Image: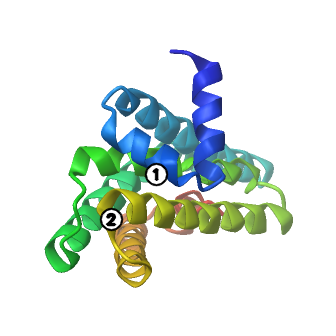
Amino acid sequence: MDTTNLIENVMRAVRFDAAFYREAANDERYSRQALTVVLIVAALSGLGAFLGNVLAGAIFSALFGLILGVALAVAGYYVWVYVVYYIGSQFFQGRATAPQLLRSLGYAYAPMALGVLSFIPCFGGLVALAGSVWSLACGFFAVREVHQLDDGKTLITVIGGWLAVAIVTAVVGMIAAIFGIGAMGMGALLGAR
């Protein structure tokens, strides 16, 4: 894989390049690279949670948080894509296919890599939150271009997808609490300390 091309594509995506989102959606060659972006983001976010727990002296929590955080980040991507696909196509006659959204939203996930800084007290959580908001904005541009929806319908579609991810995260957190894992994994799940 050409890493120069990967970085260039990510830079285009995080700059809200509408032409790039259309290009990625309509070219199957971007599929592998978009998934690579998601996996790198998940690993970086998990690493941030891991470092936060290590600095807090919670080694078991750190390992658990790393594994669960990475898995949940990847699962969250798929939940976001398929909910966005469903809402856009079923309620607003969006034109995108699920594979097109997988490619375009994979790149939109890139700003969430700022979650790697979540271990820094006070500042890190804010930076991770800023990355999430930035990713949501990128997702807005991606969905608008690929689903071909107006701004209002795009906003409802994208936020609906993010709410679904938040619900999945909360459910996993409750299950972890029931099984005694509790708060030690929640920081990793939420990308905060």
Q: Which kind of residue does numbered mark 2 sit on?
A: Gln
- How far apart, in angstroms, are the residues tagged by discs 2 and 1? 26 Å
Q: Residues within 10 Å of mark 1 (few under 14, many from 20)?
A: many
Residue at 18 percent across and 79 percent down: it is 91
**Nearer mark to the viewer, of 2 and 1:** 2
Q: Residues within 10 Å of mark 2 (few under 14, many from 20)?
A: some
Residue lying farthest top?
A: 1
Nearest to the observer: residue 118 or residue 31 = 31
Tell me if 39 is positioned left or right of 56 in this view: left
Place of residue 58 in the rendered image (x, y in percent of width and height, measured from the top left): 68, 51
Q: Earlier in the sequence, mark 2 or mark 1?
A: 1
For numbered disc 1, what is the local secondary structure?
A: helix
According to the picture, the residue beneath numbered tag 2 turns out to be 148
Q: Quadrant of the C terminus?
A: bottom right
Place of residue 23 in the rendered image (x, y in percent of width and height, measured from the top left): 42, 40
Place of residue 89 in the rendered image (x, y in percent of width and height, measured from the top left): 18, 68
Nearest to the observer: residue 120 or residue 153 = 153
Please determine whether, in this image, residue 61 is positioned above or below residue 193.
above
Answer yes or no: is residue 66 visible. Answer: yes
Which of the numbered marks, if any, corresponds to residue 73? 1
Q: Kindly indicate whether the residue at mark 1 contacts the one at mark 2 (C-beta within 8 angstroms).
A: no
